Image: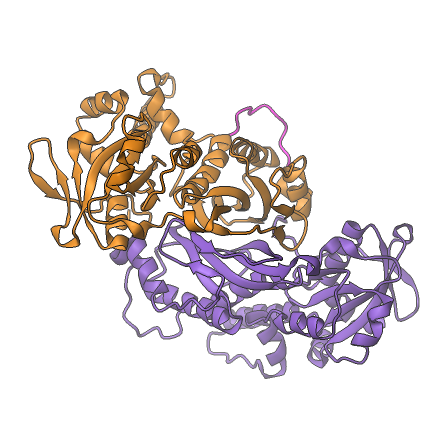
Chain colours: A orange, B purple
């Protein structure tokens, strides 16, 4: 769990709630001009400007459900917990500016473990230019729970909802997908191998991209800037957190439209293809249902097509149809397969 | 746990994450004009106006740490979880407008239990005119965890920080304190009695006020309106969640001042006095260290004294001194006792 297990351990109870918060948040610098007051009062204060709106999102990560500290270093966990929230802000075509972090921790975690968790949180804040402005730290009866809320801003007429897709719009995906899910499968397999033989050395070399996408995902801040530079306002947008098929269905349901997605257009990394072959699983299934890619899925009007054409950041994977035509995958064999949500469900029974 | 145990139970897994959220949030009406988009997208969208600033606070409640479902009905828990957050917004002299609600739930909770929890959340939202605009629902490996974030607004020059208290300011408390903590003691005692003899009928009649303050606390929305009407801008303000002594120390530390608090001025309800006698505990200790009262503690300039004088909502319990004079309780016997934080610490070891 801890990167350096030889360091001395400090019990959380030695510091108390306020002492612990002071300790973990010391040295935090506020860099966003909209942050009027950060940590240290009953609430943070955020200024507002002209025709900007605020966007707010929140996500909760639970040990044993969303992460396994057996292979997720705490620093990476802190980083990822921030990223999943920022991704939701970008999916509104907005820019995140502040986050709050609440944690419930069992007393098996020493202060040093929380320091590593906060290192990851602070690193993400720095890279994505976000201020940590508040939170809550309490104890838990069992594992670790992290709840983060992110607040961003966007010009009033620039918000991208899920609901704006129109017939004939193009469906666009950033980056490639499926890798994060496969990364988790690789880590799970190595964990089982290690359990069976603690002397085994994991060889993750052929899976570096997959493992990195799982353990250290990034949110597509660059895409929001790029879309602005290209003068493209998506008619609808969502981030790919639960799996591509689930996200396509969200856009179609919210917009009251149908969609054709082309199997041969779905962008896959070569490591995804080779690992799917090795694991003997269908790469399209992984791409559609995998989740945790944190890419952006959006629709644009046909008129905007020339602006994004040939840009390596974007792949046009389908187009929007009338609602009555339904949501289909057009397979390589040119058959129409209805898209169903098989995304990850955190409430399913084991 | 459930109010009506004869109702049929529905497993959460039958609905799935999105189905459950749809089910629990259906019928939610958005009433705040600043809410542009509520539940149903990657993030909520909130409009901003002129010289208003936004305030943001977050609190996490953990089963077995902050509440015991043995005597806390789920409806009350939902209500209280909202109240504790709104109280922090009022403590900034701001008005809450939106909340997000994240929950981790073990699968021992059927959908009907979550309906009751949400009933309490919705009731608080309605009474305090706040919109529920987002959240996250996931599973937990053990108990129930609720994390709420509240967002409010306040005119730019009307924010009350903890840090503005000045020498000679008056220290003012709303309502009375100590009751919520005693209510918890009464409930704990009845639980032990019930465990020893399941046929015993609890007689909570002499403790109605105490139990209500524990199970169904209110936040002082009325005080923010009243202060505005009276044209009083507190120089500093905090809500009494962890205990009066802890809150006084927060204001003094943040403001760089000292304080004298007068024991005989601390407002106590007659039930607090009689129950302290019955339990053979010192009522001043309870008042100073009890917590969970959700009253407001603030400072005002001497010039504002005539505006609040004789108002039954306010009690002047002390005055601000120079930092070097320290923070003291002036006892009924006129001795000076240093105030130390003995407020509730959610991180202490059992």
Instruction: Say whether residue B40 is visible.
Output: yes
Residue A78 rendering spot, x and y as whole percentages: 50, 36
Q: Which residue corresponds to the image point at 80% horizontal and 54% vertical from the top-left?
A: B252
The residue shown at (26%, 31%) is A315
Q: Is residue B280 above or below residue A54?
A: below
Q: How many marks?
A: 0
Along the line of sight, which residue is nearer the eye, A2 or B175? B175
Left or right of B144? Residue B261 is right
Q: Residue furthest bottom?
A: B205
- Spot occupied by residue A262 in the image (x, y as percentages of width and height): 16, 35
- Residue A319: x %, y % from top left: 20, 41
Please indicate whether residue A75 sits to the left or right of residue B231 in the image. Answer: left
Question: Is residue A348 among the parts visible in the rendering?
Answer: no
Majority secondary structure in the magenta region: loop
**In which quarter of the view is residue B54 placed?**
bottom right
Q: Is residue B331 above or below residue A144?
A: below
Vertical placement of residue A156 versus B314, above or below: above
Give the residue displayed 34% in from the left and 35% down from the top: A295
B339 within the magenta span: no
Which sits in the foreground, B261 or A302? A302
- Which of the 4 image quadrants contains residue B231? bottom right
Closer to us: B59 or A16: B59
Range covered by the magenta-colored residues = A1-10
Spot occupied by residue B143 in the image (x, y as percentages of width and height): 44, 54
């Amino acid at each position: 769990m801890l990167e350096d297990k030889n360091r001395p351990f400090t019990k959380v109870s030695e510091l108390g709630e306020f002492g612990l918060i002071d300790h973990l948040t010391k040295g935090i610098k506020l860099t966003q001009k909209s942050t009027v007051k950060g940590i240290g009062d009953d609430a943070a204060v955020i200024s507002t400007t002209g025709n900007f709106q605020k966007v707010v999102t929140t996500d909760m990560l639970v040990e044993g459900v969303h992460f396994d500290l057996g292979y997720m270093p705490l620093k990476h966990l802190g980083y990822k917990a921030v990223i999943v929230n920022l991704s939701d802000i970008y999916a509104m075509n907005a820019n995140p500016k502040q986050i709050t972090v609440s944690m419930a921790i069992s007393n098996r975690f020493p202060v040093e473990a929380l320091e590593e968790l906060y290192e990851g949180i602070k690193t993400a804040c720095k890279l994505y230019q976000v201020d940590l402005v508040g939170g809550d730290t309490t104890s838990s009866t069992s594992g670790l729970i992290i709840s983060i809320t992110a607040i961003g801003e966007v010009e009033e007429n620039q918000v991208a909802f899920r609901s704006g897709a129109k017939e004939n719009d193009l469906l666009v995906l950033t980056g490639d997908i499926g890798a994060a899910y496969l990364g988790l499968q690789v880590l799970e397999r190595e964990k089982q191998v290690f359990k069976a033989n603690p002397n085994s050395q994991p060889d993750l070399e052929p899976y570096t991209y997959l493992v990195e996408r799982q353990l250290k995902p990034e949110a597509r801040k660059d895409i929001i800037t790029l879309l602005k530079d290209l003068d493209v306002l998506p008619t609808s947008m969502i981030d790919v957190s639960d799996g591509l098929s689930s996200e396509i269905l969200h856009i179609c349901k919210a917009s009251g439209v149908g969609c054709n997605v082309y199997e041969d257009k779905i962008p896959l990394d070569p490591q995804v293809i080779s690992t799917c072959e090795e694991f003997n699983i269908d790469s399209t299934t992984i791409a559609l249902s995998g989740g945790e890619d944190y890419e952006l899925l959006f629709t644009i009007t046909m008129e905007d097509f020339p602006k994004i054409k040939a840009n390596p950041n974007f792949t046009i994977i389908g187009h929007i149809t009338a609602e009555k035509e339904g949501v289909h995958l057009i397979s390589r064999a040119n058959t129409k397969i209805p898209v169903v949500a098989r995304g990850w469900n955190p409430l399913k029974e084991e």
